[in-house]
Amino acid sequence: MTKQIAGKKESTEKECMAGKMKSSERKQGLVTDKFTVGYGKKVILSNVNLMAEPGRVLTLIGPNGSGKSTILKSIVKQLKSLDGVVYLNGKATSEMKEAEIAKSLSMVMTEHIHPELMSCRDVVATGRYPYTGRLGILDKQDWKLVDEAITMVHAEEVAEQSFTRISDGQRQRVMLARAICQDTAILVLDEPTSYLDIRYKLDILNSIRKLARERNIAVMMSLHELDLVQKVSDMVACVDGTTVSHIGTPEEIFQGSLVQKLYGIEEKNFDSMLGIMQMPGNKAAPNVFVIGGGGAAIPTYYRLQREHIPFAAGILFENDVEYPVATALASKVITAKAFYPMEEAQLEEAKKILAGCETCICTCENFGPYNMLNKELRSLAEEQGKLK
Amino acid sequence: MKRYAVSFITIIILLVGLIFWNIGSGSISISWDELWNILLKQTEEGTAYHIIWDIRLPRILAAVMLGGALSISGFLLQTFFGNPIAGPYVLGISSGAKLMVALAMIYLLGRGITISSFGMVAAAFAGSLLAMGFVLLISMKVHRMSLLIVCGILIGYICSAITDICVTFADDSNIVNLHNWSQGSFSGMNWSNILMIFILTLLSFLAAMFLAKPIGAYQMGETYARNMGVNITVLRVSLILLSSLLSACVTAFAGPISFVGIAVPHLIKSATGTAKPLVLIPGCFLGGAVVTLFCDGIARTLFAPTEVSISTVTAVFLVPVVIVMMLRRQEERG
């Protein structure tokens, strides 16, 4: 079942990549066709072909200045696009009036607004603007939708407060509520989680998923937090500063070293599978030997990395939770194959490295039949007076 | 809703009170009985009748309508620039209008043609747009509002200086009035002026009310306003034309009047506790009328029979308001 869906998605993506957008005019959601964007006359990105389908979240990733925001700003016409077409539910925006676009696409951008003397509820209510009459007065039904949107993003407690006096996190929620009650099939979000603490990040992304799932909204957004991208996106597009270099499911994008190359970092510094970032460790000849396993040594690895002390780690199974951290930070990791007992050869290698180290740290307290060799290593370190 | 109502009722009571104060006070004192008779047209002759009907009433109506027009002009400019320190006077727009009116008057009077009130407004409108054009050109280069205001004030100085030169050297006996006018004054209003002012102010007021919805959206910033379905270009052009027309109308008939355009929208926001254009536009009109009528009353009566220029009085009362507002904003931002 899942395979089928993935396969179907893949074929649509291939169509996009090949620029076969003939059917795009009939496609629902947000589609860009050979979109060229930039500032003034200067082209930043060209041939941008993206598609956010109803009920799905498309996330743009890429380093700072790669043009994610430029794409989104051009879609919402904050910037003049240089070439290509944007389709909203099959209709080109160039042929739509502002009022019509307002009923198809809502957005939350990064720019701060300073509305005077407006409560958060008033700000949310501006989302109903496209549906009001000549004087812009909201009726009961409008206010009902406003309050629903506020409830959906859990912003009830700030609803009556002045918008300029609430925190960034609450502001972002209010702006999302504003976009929600605009009641559009398409939602564009530029870095909806920046400046937010972890609680608000989770909250906002949860709301976004909920919108896609429950209201079948097509979401296109940019996101900086790679660890969150995989968890919230149905599709990921890599923006590399000249065009959209790759589009695929998170599974496809977060494998191999694609993401690391996109951001110009070393493969070890980002664990694409878990979405964990690692600072580079000191890779000189190890001074410290860490006997770990099971996750207990991770704080020690981080401490040694912070203090810039080169260290070796072992003996670790390849499927140990510590393994990705150790390989990123340690100058040397002695590994054992997963689901197999540790081997003598690994012990010998560990002993050799231990001989060159001044100290040994053992975070392992319980030794079972499969890590007896670590116990032996610990005893050896103790004999040599290296154990701390 | 209650707060709007209280504010509006208070403003209207103030306005009515000020109207009566202004009718009753002046260098010639008229008793209340006599006043009632004159107002109800029981007696239709005598000096007092002419003073009331030909001098004081037109003047009061002019102060009410032009004060209102000026405040709306200020509110529209503040919306346009997204900044509460903007106003037709500080941006040099009033002075631009003044210069053009002075030039037109001197040119036409030199040829023995009396300029019609429509011609005055047309000249003032051209001057407003010219000064506005300069300010907009500068605003494309300078994004800091404080610098833009400084540039506006400088444009105002240049225009005033040129006006002064023209007025000084054009020593035609007909231009005696010009000096008073160029300092800002409501004196010398007649009923044909009032009719012209009434038509222009009413039309502009209705146009502003018609724009209340997009202005409300524009307060959320250009990006969001566009996403709310507002045609930004149309709105921006309308704001410029309308605010220029309003301040041109004021300048053509009463000369440049300082600070009403900046201070009144702020006072009304504080009084009503809202920035909604649907409330603020009528609020600014009434508030502007009250403030201007009050200041004109003082200008007339303080050293009667000598008059102080209206801008002298508005500056004394309104500059502190502007300063307090700027300090408060600083606090909120910081």
Image (cartoon, coloured by chain):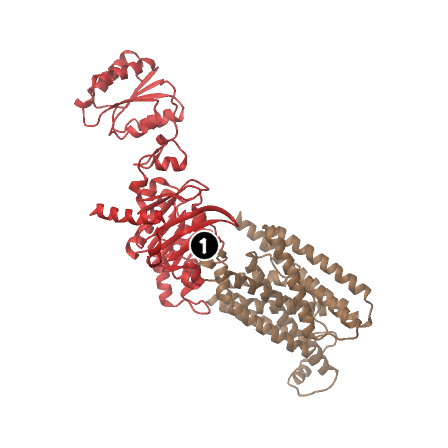
Chain colours: A red, B brown
* Closer-to-camera residue (B29/B157): B157
Up/down of B117 relative to A5, above or below: below
Instruction: Give the mark count.
Output: 1
The answer to whether residue A146 is seen in the rendering is yes
Query: Residue B266, position in %: x, y?
Result: 57, 60
Residue at 82% x, 70% y: name it.
Answer: B172
Residue at 72% x, 79% y: name it.
Answer: B51
Q: Secondary structure at mark 1?
A: helix
Residue at 63% x, 50% y: name it.
Answer: B147
Query: Residue B166, position in %: x, y?
Result: 78, 63
The answer to whether residue A29 is seen in the rendering is no
Q: In which image quadrant can residue A238 be found?
A: top left
Q: In which image quadrant can residue B15 be found?
A: bottom right
> Disc 1 marks which amino acid?
Phe
CA neighbours of label 1 inside 10 A, class few (<14), some (14 to 19), many (20+): many
Residue at 37% x, 18% y: name it.
Answer: A285
User: Viewed as shown, does residue B325 lie left or right of A112?
Assistant: right
Query: Residue A307, position in %: x, y?
Result: 40, 24
Q: Chain of mark 1?
A: A
Query: Residue B7, position in %: x, y?
Result: 52, 67
* Closer-to-camera residue (A35/A268): A35
Quadrant of the image containing the C terminus of chain A: top left
Residue for badge 1: A163
User: Viewed as shown, does residue A55 lie left or right of B212?
Assistant: left
| Residue at the left extreme, as displayed | A369
